[in-house]
Amino acid sequence: GEKISIENNDKWLLYFVVCIVAINLFYGVLHGETNFIQASMYYVYNLLVVLIFRAYAEERDTFLVNVARICKVNLVLQLFFYITGIGRYFAASRYMGTFNDPNQMAFFVYISLMMAFLISRIRGGKLSLVYHVIAMALIFLTASAGMLMGMVLFYGLEALPKVRILAQRQHSVRAILIGTAFLAALVLFSPEIGDYIVDVSESSIVERAEEKLSRIEESAAGPTNIEERGIDRLYLYPEKLLYGAGEGFHERFEQSYLDGEVHSTLLSVLFYYGVLPTAALLYWIYKNIGRLSAGNVAVVLSLFLESLTLLNQRQSLFWMIFVLLNVLYKKQTAETETAAVPAALRAGELKDTATDTLLR
C-alpha cells in the first residue's frame, strides 16, 4: 500500500493531539473516569482521517470527484427522505431526517455542500445552483439557527465581489433596481401575501430565532444562550483556560448551569485543553488556509460562525474541510506562479530586444 506521511502542516495537529491525550490521561487517572480516554480517541481517529484524506486528495483527482459525487448524493437523498415522509421530526416541528438530532442533520447538509463547493473550485468548475437550493431548504426545515446564520454569512461573502463588479456598471445597477422594484410590487399586491407572512412568522426557524434573541440578556426568567451552551464555564473557571480542564466528568463543574459538555467548538477546546494546545490547533488551521481568497473566506467564516454554538470537532467532515481548503490554496498558488513565469520571460525578451537595438 501507499505510505502515509505527516506533512509539516500536520505536525502541528499531531502536537495538538499529543497534548490532548496527555491532559485527558492526567485527569482520567485523577478522577478515576474512563470518559476522558474516550474523548481522546475521537481526536486520534480524526488525526488519522486528516493524514489519509490529505494523501488521497492531493494525489488523486478521481478521489475528489467521487467525494463530490457522494456529497451531492447525500443532499439529494435527504431531500428524497423528506418528500417521501421517511425522515423524522424532533418535537414535531424540527425536521431531522435520518439523524438523531436536527443540528446533526443541519451540520451534515452544510458540510456536504461546502465540500462539494470546494471540490468544484479545486477542479476549476462551479457547483450547480440546485444543490445550494436543496441545502438551504433542508437547513431551514431543521430550524438550526446557528447553521442558518452560517449559510447567510457564506452567501453574503460570496456575493460581495459580484456586487462590487455590478456596482461599477451603471446599466447593471439600473437593471437590478428596476427588477427589485418589480418583484417587490408583485409580492406586495399578491392576494396570498398575508397568508405567506403568517406562515413564515409561525415557522420553527423564526420562532427559534426570536426565542434566542429574547434570551440574550435574560437571566431572571431563565438561562441565557451562554449558560444553556455551557459556555459560562469559561468565566466561572478561568484558571482552566491556562492549563485545561480535561474533556470528561462534566458533573464536577457545579457552578455551571449545564451539567453536560460545552457546546462550542473552539471555546470547548480552549476550556478543556488550555491556551497552548488551542494555539497549536489555530496555527494548524492557519497553515492550511494560507492567504485567503474570497471563496475561502466565505467557507471558513461561515464554518467558524456556526461552530460557535455547536460541537463539531468529533465530526471527521469538519477536519476534512481544512484539508480541502489547503488543496485549493496550493492549486491557486501554483496557477499564480505558472502565470507569472511567461510574464517574466516576456519582460526579459523585451529587455534583450531593447539592449540589442541600442548596441546596433
Image (cartoon, rainbow, N blue to C red):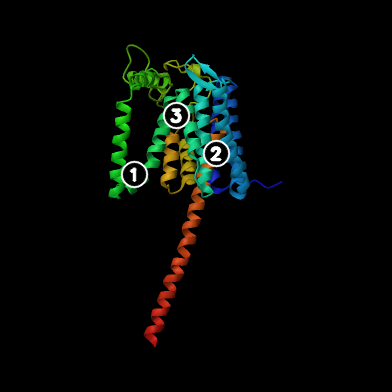
Left or right of residue 268, residue 58 in this image: right
Front one among 256 and 341: 341
User: What is the secondary structure assignment of the residue under circle 1?
Assistant: helix
Relative to 189, residue 182 above or below = below
Q: In the image, what residue occupies the spot 51% across and 36% down?
A: 131
User: What is the secondary structure assignment of the residue under circle 2?
Assistant: helix
Q: Is residue 277 visible?
A: no
Residue type at mark 3: give it. Met
Q: In the rendered image, which quarter contains the C terminus?
A: bottom left
Residue that mark 2 sits on = 320
What is the quadrant of residue 323 in the picture?
top right
Residue that mark 3 sits on = 147
Residue type at mark 2: give it. Met
The answer for how far apart the CA atoms under marks 1 and 3 are is 24 Å
Q: Please tell me which of labels 3 and 2 falls first in the chain.
A: 3
Residue that protrudes farthest toward the top in the picture: 221
Left or right of residue 174, residue 60 in this image: right
Q: Which mark is residue 163?
A: 1
Q: Is residue 80 visible?
A: yes
Q: In the image, what residue occupies the spot 42% across and 29% down?
A: 148
In percent of width and height, residue 214 lies at: 33, 18
The answer for how far apart the CA atoms under marks 1 and 2 are is 30 Å
Relative to 317, residue 344 above or below = below
Q: Please tell me which of labels 1 and 3 falls first in the chain.
A: 3
Q: Which label sits in the foreground, 1 or 2?
A: 1
